[in-house]
Image (cartoon, helix red, strand yellow):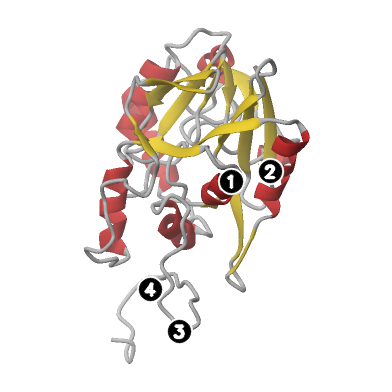
Amino acid sequence: MHVEPFFDPRTFTLTYVVVDPDTRDALVIDPVLDYEAGGAIVSTESVDQVSAYLRREGLTLRAILETHAHADHLTGSQVLRARFPGAFVAIGERIREVQGVFRQIFELGDEFAVDGRQFDRLLVDGEKFAAGSLVVRVIATPGHTPACVSYHIGDAVFTGDALFMPDYGTGRCDFPRGSAEAMYHSVTTRLYALPDETRVFVGHDYQPNGRPLAFESTIGEERRHNVQLPADRSEEDFVAFRRARDAKLDAPKLLYPSLQVNIRAGHLPDPSSPDKTPFLKIPLRLRRPIDGLG
């Protein structure tokens, strides 16, 4: 099995193409749709690179897998699905909980379905499925969001925002329905239960201290050297650390655009203007009451 990485430096996101070199079947995990916030401009540079690789290598795209509804980038899943007919888009079944939360936050109304129908497949913890010749096992790894899943494929696991490189740690847990307790158990009892030699491919690399890009470790390295959650750290200690750290983190720059698109499986909101331009909602939050602003 070959894993081809694509890095988006604007959002520090890793997209992976997983390839069976014998059959030329392929999966894509966490594709990126580019979004320039200043002008609200959507473009396809990142997904173009993935598409070009798939075509150049003569690969058959079988599935597009999301580890969760991302809060830092828009997903390019629907662009890939349109370009490679026959591929399906899948995510963990608890996306329905995330949809329910953000339907209220963004006041999307009853017309926005919260049953996951926007996705082609909803995946259950422990489920195994074939995408061409590639066999995927779903591991529920909630904590960052309740819907987070990791994908165990061959000798590798793709952890999304659950587990990062050993010198960075784990994902934040302060989003709605996030849970530091759940993160602790997802990592220590689910991911660390895999064999030490299992390759770990992370969802982001923030390049701490300016080091070069890194995206692959092993379960053994994570268990021994993860700076936030080594295998011998207590739950109480980790939860206290995670909550204190998360309280100091800024919100992701693309939080509101990303979630409105990603809970729709990568579809843009239905155009509501006469010229068919799709619109996003940006809720305003006042730090304190301000005279004249209501």
Separation of marks 3 and 2 at Cα, in angstroms: 32 Å
Secondary structure state at the residue bearing disc 2: helix
Where does residue 143 sit, x and y in percent of width and height? 36, 35
Instruction: Look at 44% across and 69% down and name the residue there.
Output: 280
Vertical position of residue 87 compared to residue 277: above or below: above
Q: Mark 1 touching mark 2, by CB under 8 A? A: yes
| Residue 274 badge | 3
Residue nearest the observer in this picture, 193 or 4: 4
Q: Nearer the viewer, mark 4 or mark 1?
A: 1
Count residues near mark 3 (Cα–Cα under 10 Å), then give few for <14, some for 14-19, many for 20+. few
Q: Mark 3 touching mark 2, by CB under 8 A? A: no
| Residue 127 badge | none
Res 168 seen here: no
Of the two numbered discs 1 and 2 on the same chain, state the one appearing first in sequence: 2
Q: Mark 1 touching mark 3, by CB under 8 A? A: no
Instruction: Look at 31% across and 51% down and name the residue there.
Output: 99
Count residues near mark 1 (Cα–Cα under 10 Å), then give few for <14, some for 14-19, many for 20+. many
**Residue annotated with mark 2:** 51
Res 282 seen here: yes
Separation of marks 1 and 3 at Cα, in angstroms: 28 Å
Q: Mark 4 touching mark 1, by CB under 8 A? A: no
- Residue type beneath disc 4: Leu
**Residue annotated with mark 4:** 284
Vertical position of residue 35 compared to residue 13: above or below: below
Separation of marks 1 and 2 at Cα, in angstroms: 7 Å
Separation of marks 3 and 4 at Cα, in angstroms: 25 Å
**Quadrant, the N terminus:** top right
- Residue type beneath disc 2: Ser
**Residue annotated with mark 1:** 80
